[in-house]
Image (cartoon, coloured by chain):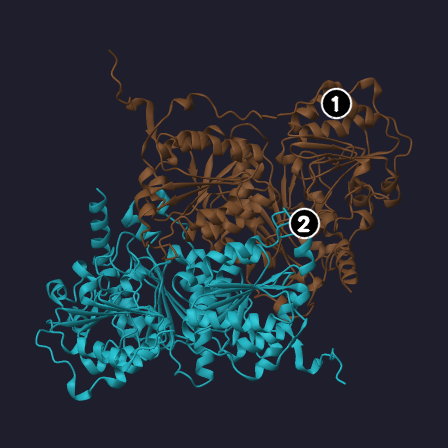
Chain colours: A brown, B cyan
Amino acid sequence: MKTLSRSVNMSDHIELAKFLFVRLHQLGVGSIHGVPGDFNLTILDYVEPAGLTWVGSANELNAAYAADGYARIKGISALITTFGVGELSAINGIAGAYAERSPVVHIVGTPSTAMQDAGTCLHHSLGDGDLRVYSRLYKSVTVAQTNLRDPKSAPQQVDAILRQCILESRPVYIELPTDMVSALVPCSVLESPIDLTVTSSQELHDADIDAIIERIHTSKQPFIIVDGFASRYGIVSEVNELVRITGIPTATTPFGKGIVNEAYPNFYGLYEGVIGTNIPITWAEKCDLILRIAPLNSNVNTLSFSTIPEAQRTITFNKDSINICDTTTFRDVDIKAVFQAILQRMPQDKLPHNEVYPQQLHHPLQELTALPEPTADGVVDQGTFYRRISSFFRPHDIILAETGTASIGSREFILPEKTQLLNSSIWLSIGFMLPAAQGVALAQRELGASGKCLPGRVILFEGDGSFQMTSQAISDIVRNRLNVTVFLLNNDGYTIERLIHGMSAHYNDIQPWRYLQSASYFGAPEDDESYPVTTRRVGNWGQLMNLMRDEDFSDGKGFKMAEILMAKDDAVESLKTLVNKAKSSAQ
Amino acid sequence: MKTLSRSVNMSDHIELAKFLFVRLHQLGVGSIHGVPGDFNLTILDYVEPAGLTWVGSANELNAAYAADGYARIKGISALITTFGVGELSAINGIAGAYAERSPVVHIVGTPSTAMQDAGTCLHHSLGDGDLRVYSRLYKSVTVAQTNLRDPKSAPQQVDAILRQCILESRPVYIELPTDMVSALVPCSVLESPIDLTVTSSQELHDADIDAIIERIHTSKQPFIIVDGFASRYGIVSEVNELVRITGIPTATTPFGKGIVNEAYPNFYGLYEGVIGTNIPITWAEKCDLILRIAPLNSNVNTLSFSTIPEAQRTITFNKDSINICDTTTFRDVDIKAVFQAILQRMPQDKLPHNEVYPQQLHHPLQELTALPEPTADGVVDQGTFYRRISSFFRPHDIILAETGTASIGSREFILPEKTQLLNSSIWLSIGFMLPAAQGVALAQRELGASGKCLPGRVILFEGDGSFQMTSQAISDIVRNRLNVTVFLLNNDGYTIERLIHGMSAHYNDIQPWRYLQSASYFGAPEDDESYPVTTRRVGNWGQLMNLMRDEDFSDGKGFKMAEILMAKDDAVESLKTLVNKAKSSAQ
């Protein structure tokens, strides 16, 4: 006779924190960002034994921003904060990851289940006995939340939420109570990786794919607009292949810049509607078919919604839906599978052949060579800075442009192939990019070490106002011996705000820091050959040109910082135009 | 015949932002903290014309923390952030103000009412058209919220929410849409100040007051425990008077330290239950009446709830209720009026006279004088540091002790009369106190300028880990030429976490900064006699003793910073005891 209750075989069980970290490691997480606190200390004991690196950020907002940057490169990241004070400091960063679809796993060390149930008046609580209040706040800025209270179900909870994080490409929130950290949970599922198959209820038939191809082929004047979510949906290579083999005139949005190989002859630059200089608006408005790929419809990315074409002449490819010219909508599809099917079924001998391609008014590369040599003692102006500095870039560089004059300016970068550009096109939280650069540099180093990418540089462009928000990220960069090059655009305050309102208002001024002391202040080693620190002040074009040729600066090794002095009312022309249009429409 | 519609007399109207700032100015706000953003720029145009100073913080979390510190001194403060990214960066600071009852008015510049209604996909939104999502998050951490959409009702909305902020002594949240900033609103109410009368439904009769007095007089062994909310309820002077005239043995909680004049002969120090050294626990447990004033019942403040006496022998005075020995409860009372009535009706010739006052085992002042002279070349130890440094303090100083070893250590300070101590006893967010010191110094300067207080110093004690969280607050201190003295306790990492768990764990290490470069890095003027910068490194007791005698350091003028090197496993004895007790009870 069998016994009704069988004893649990504990060799089939491991500690919950270990389970969680094994899963994260399996998914490609190599390092974890965060800050210790008394509700998460025992969790941290499991980080390094799981083969993961603990970053140890100076504060939680920087940790969250860095985790976002890391996730944009590696496709997943993890952040650990403590209950209340830690997680609330990070919430702006997680909200940004939500808005811009960056898959960050936010793990919070919370009070024990007994204290949660008793409503104990604990430190880091609001004092009202409600210890779950922060988890409710996180419902607005994460795509899934889970509280790991039950050892039996915890493995399934972990697997389900990690799957959702990756498939939705959005942050998730995990509460790990102190008494559950080392609770033993069944671990047999660890033998199989988490199932990341996209379950789409609607599979497009060959006929549907052929109909899309036919629609492309019959177009007299097609146009491809690639947007930034293409990288989140994992379709960058498919999109590039489509652009390459069709030869259709292609542009990106501001958010999408860097996703399409800018060396393709049919790459036309940024589509910015009436304020754009690359694509004749008269031509764009006559296109009879626009392939709009992975769009982000924010005001900033669509130039106040002016670059969203009419649905009747547009095929829009979203994460899990396709809208064909406002006549057919396929919902709950696997967008990557659709692109692969299109590429596979597109007849190579019947590529589209269009007569009315637009003249490339200002092909980016032509623009660069057409620039006259700057006067050596002239002040560096934003009007040509972004194009001139482009000759500093090399394949495999990852370039970040902070919100503000730098981000708008980055639209004028001319990017070599195999570079990536990170900017923000809806969240626009100044201060994001410096910690993000730390996360990106760490992700890049890990990918390089595993042979998954060639070593490039991480190059950040950031204004002085943004820099001040999160400056201690340099401490994290230096501490983790990461290779980061910072171009600090010192224009003496919040220049983008000046242009919008209050050009000479006191509130747009900031405290002048001694920025080039950053590495020293934040504890960089002195005279350590394995981690060189190189700083330069650039007051004119001649110094900038010298800097770009200076191998000590351009090798990308260690921490580099160039402070570029710029006029406080200067910006690229398109930004001035944008602001003036906004002002006149507000009148 | 009268016309049915009369034209509005616009001279009776002013712009809404002006109305709001006039009200804040009337209530005692002299300066506003915050960070500009494109949704609040036009609001900022009204700050300085209203006679208010714009602080211009380096980031929003620091601005919120500083506003909290300012409010703890002045009884109200204001913070302006921008929609989404700004307000979410500040939310941890506002939650702390809520938990510890600091009245901060948080004004958020939000998108126009038209955009709110249309659900526009704006920058700083999550992209889903919901532009009110952040206001819903703020419901959890503020006592009232209002959206100023209607010019007719806006003045009443402003007055009501400011009244609530002050009466509840908790933060409130105001949304000011861009199109409402300069909307004209009726302003006749500005002629009268906001009514701050406490409306208590239950007024205590003389007989009720006399019954309380009688209960005190008939007590054989009374004991007064004063807690930190006494300052929030505006009853500090009344409480001190009660302590003085009754002569009843009095202690404070950790949160309440500094509220009672420590020079009173019947002041016994901190009541810390079994781990305390000032009050014999055997005596405290036999007290037949405990007056518990304005308590905060958090685990940290009550030594894991062990110092909360039985209700049967306690009169508890809360913000708007009084519980008398678990037999009678008065609700919805005006606590300040109650204290004033008790003081007025307490017969001077019939003061309590008790036989069994406890022997003062360790009167703080005796302890100080009993300390042996330290060895000049000995490392500064936490065990005696807090008592020895107390001789540095002077009347009118405001002293801040950051969460961690400094806060627990500050329980051993011996405070001269007319000093104030700020610590955190439920929120405990490391990084709070440095920006808070900026806010405190600004409030103190304003009070000094208006003759409302004598100029003292602002002296902060903070660990290195906390300092790194919010270091750019020094930029705000320097920019606003504020007088702040910082004792940076450099113990090489998160020492309080080490004591709790992971004494030598890597995750409790931090990057070593060159802390004494702070003022220089953050742009302090060089050789400006009106704003001197003084820094010292203290490696042993001899250097500390010299520092305390050094007039250049002790004058409190400009920015002072002493970096005190301490052992990384060192803490006051009570902290070690606390942690060991917590560990053994968890086993």
Seen in the picture, residue B280 relative to A53 is either above or below; the reply is below
Name the residue at the front extreme.
B1
Q: Amino acid at mark 1?
A: Asp
To which quarter of the image does residue A484 belong? top right
Tell me if I can see residue B532 in this picture: no
* Relative image position of residue B482 (x, y in whole percent): 47, 73
Name the residue at the right extreme.
A355
* Relative image position of residue B500 (x, y in whole percent): 28, 48
Q: Which residue is mark 2?
A: B121
Residue sitting at x 33%, y 26%? A13
Which of B186/A124 is in front? B186
Seen in the picture, residue B57 relative to B241 is either above or below; the reply is above
| Position of the C terminus of chain B by quadrant | top left
Q: CA distance from mark 1 to mark 2?
A: 31 Å
Residue sitting at x 52%, y 81%? B193
Q: Which mark is residue A578?
A: none
Tell me if I can see residue A394 in this picture: yes
How many discs mark residues in the rendered view?
A: 2
To which quarter of the image does residue B250 belong? bottom left
* Relative image position of residue B472 (x, y in whole percent): 49, 61
Is the residue at mark 1 from the same chain as the one at mark 2? no
Which of A484/B160 is in front? B160
* Secondary structure at numbered mark 2: loop
* Secondary structure at numbered mark 1: helix
Q: Amino acid at mark 2?
A: Cys
Q: Which residue is mark 1?
A: A208
Chain bearing tag 1 is A
Which of A102/A445 is in front? A102
Q: Is residue B40 left or right of residue B426?
A: right
